[in-house]
Image (cartoon, grey):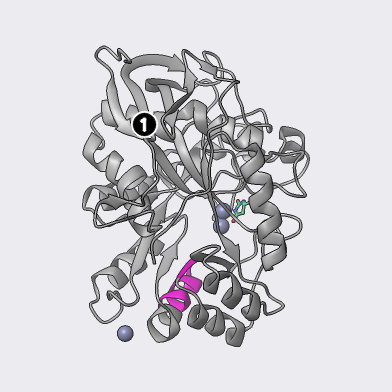
């Protein structure tokens, strides 16, 4: 029996988009520290991106990463396979056929890692041989991804849409019944940083000029506003954080793309609810229900057999200061929202029926994380 008083009980947050840096880049983050950050903030499942070292572009590398995550993660996890510029179509076929993953991530623009695919033939083949393809695509590359999905694909998930202009492209595609079909749907992801941060905030201090850098880059305040409107019109499918930790020294020394996100995403959204910007129902849709449906963790509202409860308890009224009233669990040790005063905070995290976080403490005795299963 758990007495949660007047707090809100919610399904755990599913973050479709994180970079947990293991293997190969574990001085920035690893599955233990990254999953602790998740547990603290109410993320009960994260999906990890393939731009690690080595990249998750072979069956062997994927199995190695699964082993590491299973051993270390205290929350549930899924892995995205990666498309390689060196053509790994045979590996993609293998991992999908073996049902080791159900998604492939590709980079269509330059970003952190060496995964940019520029060869049109490889791009077409990736779409042809995958189920859901997650893309890092900016500007014209969004048009191209939509075309590829329509001609060859079975599903497109556009990551981190940063601006009104790019969001409009995706909205048009979603509304076009010839482009967005049951056979090849189009999904839209927005990150918290493209909702809450902009160039004005970035340019306000020398420190922010270095820290608030990521791909896609922050845009104008008017872009923040457009994205909020799109959310409230129901045109956005998910909030994914693009949790991409780098050490503060690396960020201040030279421009390095990526910022941490899992520790602040839910609190920022609950704060936005308290400011009247979004409903709780919409938060649950964007951060829990839609991710579960799109990643096929559940089918027609039913979970895979063998699942236990992933539940969080949120104090909607709790006022706190980020980085002051809490400790940062991510190995990178910083957050772009430091000193932000927020109203709303996760207070308890239950993963697979076990309490992994309570009373501002991670339960060190519980290591409940498992790889998520998916339907076809
Ligand atoms: O800013 C970014 N950082 N964008 C990406 O696409 C990759 C990420 C990273 O891995 O650091
Ligand atoms: Zn990206
Ligand atoms: Zn078609
Ligand atoms: Zn990313």
Task: Give the quarter of the figure containing the N terminus.
Answer: top left
The quarter of the picture where residue 259 lies is top right
Residue marked by disc 1:
311
Residue 76 vs 268, above or below: the answer is below
Q: Is residue 246 visible?
A: yes
Residue at the extreme front: 306
Instruction: Residue 275 in the image: state x and y as whole percent.
Output: 27, 27
Q: Name the quarter showing ligand 2.
A: bottom right
Q: Is residue 178 left or right of residue 203?
A: left
Q: Which residue corresponds to the image point at 41% horizontal and 30% vertical from the top-left?
A: 353
Residue 91 picture location, percent across and down: 65, 75
Q: Which class describes the residues within 10 Å of circle 1: few (<14), some (14-19), or many (20+)?
A: many
Query: Which stretch is magenta?
Result: 132-146
Q: Which of the two residues, 101 or 36, is positioned nearer the viewer here?
A: 101
Membership of 278 in magenta stretch: no
Task: Reply above or below: 93 against 200.
Answer: below
Which quadrant, please, contains the C terminus? bottom left
Q: Is residue 137 magenta?
A: yes
Q: Residue at x 61, y 45 (%)?
A: 244
Residue beneath the point at 51% across and 21% down: 322
Give the left or right position of residue 153, taking residue 123 as reference.
left
Q: x%, y% of residue 129?
A: 51, 80
């Amino acid at each position: 029996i758990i007495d949660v008083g007047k707090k809100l009980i919610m399904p755990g947050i599913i973050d479709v988009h994180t970079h947990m840096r293991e293997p190969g880049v574990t001085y920035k983050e690893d599955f233990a520290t990254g999953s602790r950050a998740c547990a603290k903030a109410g993320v009960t499942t994260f999906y990890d991106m393939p731009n690690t070292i080595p990249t998750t572009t072979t069956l062997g590398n994927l199995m190695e990463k699964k082993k590491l995550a299973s051993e270390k993660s205290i929350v549930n996890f899924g892995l995205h396979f990666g498309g390689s510029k060196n053509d790994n179509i045979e590996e993609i076929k293998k991992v999908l056929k073996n049902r080791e993953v159900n998604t492939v991530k590709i980079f269509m623009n330059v970003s952190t890692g060496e995964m940019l695919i520029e060869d049109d033939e490889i791009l077409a083949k990736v779409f042809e041989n995958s189920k859901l393809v997650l893309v890092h695509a900016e500007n014209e590359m969004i048009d191209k991804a939509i075309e590829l999905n329509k001609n060859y694909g079975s599903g497109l998930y556009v990551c981190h849409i940063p601006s009104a202009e790019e969001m409009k492209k995706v909205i048009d595609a979603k509304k076009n019944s010839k482009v967005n079909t049951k056979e090849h749907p189009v999904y839209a992801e927005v990150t918290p940083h493209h909702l809450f941060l902009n160039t004005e905030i970035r340019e306000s201090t020398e420190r922010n000029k270095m820290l608030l850098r990521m791909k896609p880059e922050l845009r104008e305040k008017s872009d923040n506003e457009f994205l909020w409107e799109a959310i409230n019109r129901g045109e956005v499918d998910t909030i994914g954080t693009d949790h991409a930790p780098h050490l503060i020294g690396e960020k201040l020394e030279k421009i390095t793309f990526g910022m941490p996100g899992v520790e602040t995403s839910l609190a920022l959204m609950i704060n936005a609810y308290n400011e009247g910007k979004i409903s709780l129902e919409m938060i649950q849709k964007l951060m829990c229900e839609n991710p579960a449906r799109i990643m096929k963790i559940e089918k027609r509202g039913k979970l895979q057999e063998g699942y236990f409860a992933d539940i969080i308890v949120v104090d909607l009224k709790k006022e706190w200061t980020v980085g002051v009233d809490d400790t940062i669990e991510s190995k990178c040790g910083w957050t772009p929202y430091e000193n932000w005063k927020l109203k709303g905070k996760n207070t308890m995290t239950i993963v697979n029926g076990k309490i992994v976080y309570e009373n501002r403490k991670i339960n060190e005795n519980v290591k409940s994380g498992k790889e998520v299963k998916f339907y076809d």
